[in-house]
Image (cartoon, rainbow, N blue to C red):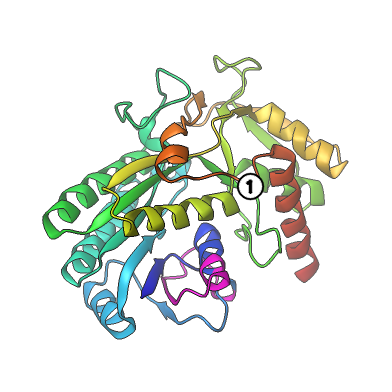
């Protein structure tokens, strides 16, 4: 049994690869390195530089490595960018995923775990939001992921490929052993940007929007530690191996923090009072989005290990310091 990890040189994908290695599971990585880093993949792991939309390449890779499970991370994931480049997002996130799903299902892959997003919900009427809520994405990014969920559902049902789509909320933190982390310098993730401000590699931090209908006027998000998210993927595979039906599940903690609360946490953990600038809202940002995680915990028997904002911040800061020292 070999697991194909697409986007395995990226932030979340690289954590997944290390998790698989820790468990002694054979893995092969496919990544076009558009945003990933070859150095994020251990030298012992077979690595193929290429695109998930290249059906011939994927078919050969599956046959050569005897792949029977796929974890699909490869995607573009910046909401503001998707508002400016919608066609690129539908091409990369939906069309290329369709090609991957098609060839995987035709090549005998039996289980498929897909990285979806809470952005499919848009600005939900209720919070926490459950998987039964009607998707109303506010950005091409969210729509491209929802479309891929539908493609996966329909193709997998016909071909007998069981799947789990995991709707990520805000992923943050780094491997506690500091083997990998968020390495993109211009990343838009709030905690990443804030710890860069701590170290002076970013000139302060911008808060986008202070007039949202939230307790302090800033957006509220559910932050999940990347290592706990990797654990959810293992739980999803075990669920499918045990005969579980294809399903879609939220990945978060069920607790929200405002932008201001996150900034305060970063200042508290780091002991650094970095500059913060107030700016207008960004297109595509919902006011509040927090996960209802009841099904994730029940159906996958998933229990988080790092459900603490200060811990998430501390790991992100430690990784950023490591990057700073390596420059």
Residue lying at 58% horizontally and 16% vertically, measured from the top left: 214
Q: Nearer the viewer, residue 251 or 148?
A: 251
Residue 116 among those drawn in magenta: no
Residue 70, relative to residue 317: is it above or below?
Answer: below
Q: Residues within 10 Å of mark 1 (few under 14, many from 20)?
A: few
* Residue 37 position by quadrant: bottom right
Please, which residue is most extreme toward the left here?
A: 158
Q: Nearer the viewer, residue 153 or 94?
A: 153
Could you say where residue 175 lies in the image, as x and y percent from the top left? Answer: 65, 59
Q: Is residue 104 visible?
A: yes
Could you say where residue 113 lies in the image, as x and y percent from the top left? Answer: 35, 56
Q: Nearer the viewer, residue 135 or 292?
A: 292
**Residue denoted by label 1:** 305
Q: Is residue 276 visible?
A: no
Residue stretch in magenta: 18-39
Q: Is residue 219 left or right of residue 271?
A: left
Residue 13, relative to residue 291: is it above or below?
Answer: below
Q: Is residue 13 left or right of residue 93?
A: right
Q: Nearer the viewer, residue 287 or 226?
A: 226
| Image quarter in which the N terminus is found | bottom left
Q: Is residue 111 left or right of residue 139?
A: left
Please, which residue is most extreme toward the front here?
A: 242
Could you say where residue 160 lies in the image, as x and y percent from the top left? Answer: 16, 58
Give SS at disc 1: loop
Residue 130, relative to residue 101: is it above or below?
Answer: above
């Amino acid at each position: 049994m070999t697991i194909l990890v697409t986007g395995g040189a990226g932030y979340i994908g690289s954590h997944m690869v290390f998790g698989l290695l820790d468990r002694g599971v054979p893995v092969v990585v496919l990544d076009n390195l558009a945003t990933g880093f070859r150095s994020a993949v251990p030298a012992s792991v077979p690595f193929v530089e290429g695109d998930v939309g290249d059906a011939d390449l994927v078919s050969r890779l599956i046959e050569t490595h005897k792949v029977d499970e796929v974890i699909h991370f490869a995607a573009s994931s910046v909401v503001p960018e998707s508002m400016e480049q919608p066609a690129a997002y539908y091409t990369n996130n939906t069309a290329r995923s369709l090609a991957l799903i098609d060839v995987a299902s035709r090549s005998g892959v039996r289980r498929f775990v897909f990285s979806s997003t809470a952005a499919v919900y848009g600005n939900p009427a209720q919070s926490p939001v459950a998987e039964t809520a009607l998707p109303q994405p506010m950005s091409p990014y969210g729509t491209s992921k929802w479309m891929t969920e539908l493609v996966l559902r329909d193709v997998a049902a016909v071909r007998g490929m069981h799947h789990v789509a995991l709707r990520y909320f805000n992923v943050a933190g780094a491997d506690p052993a500091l083997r990998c982390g968020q390495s993109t310098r211009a990343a838009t993730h709030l905690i990443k940007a804030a710890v860069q401000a701590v170290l002076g590699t970013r000139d302060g931090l911008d808060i986008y929007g202070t007039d949202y209908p939230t307790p302090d006027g800033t957006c509220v998000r559910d932050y999940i530690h990347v290592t706990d998210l990797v654990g959810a993927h293992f739980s999803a595979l075990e669920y499918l191996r045990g005969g579980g039906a294809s399903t879609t599940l939220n990945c978060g903690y069920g607790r929200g923090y405002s932008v201001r609360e996150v900034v305060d946490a970063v200042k508290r953990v780091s002991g650094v009072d970095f500059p913060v600038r107030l700016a207008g809202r960004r297109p595509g940002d919902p006011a509040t989005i927090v996960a209802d995680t009841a099904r994730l915990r029940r159906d996958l028997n998933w229990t988080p290990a790092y459900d603490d904002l200060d811990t998430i911040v501390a790991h992100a800061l430690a990784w950023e310091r490591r990057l700073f020292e390596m420059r």
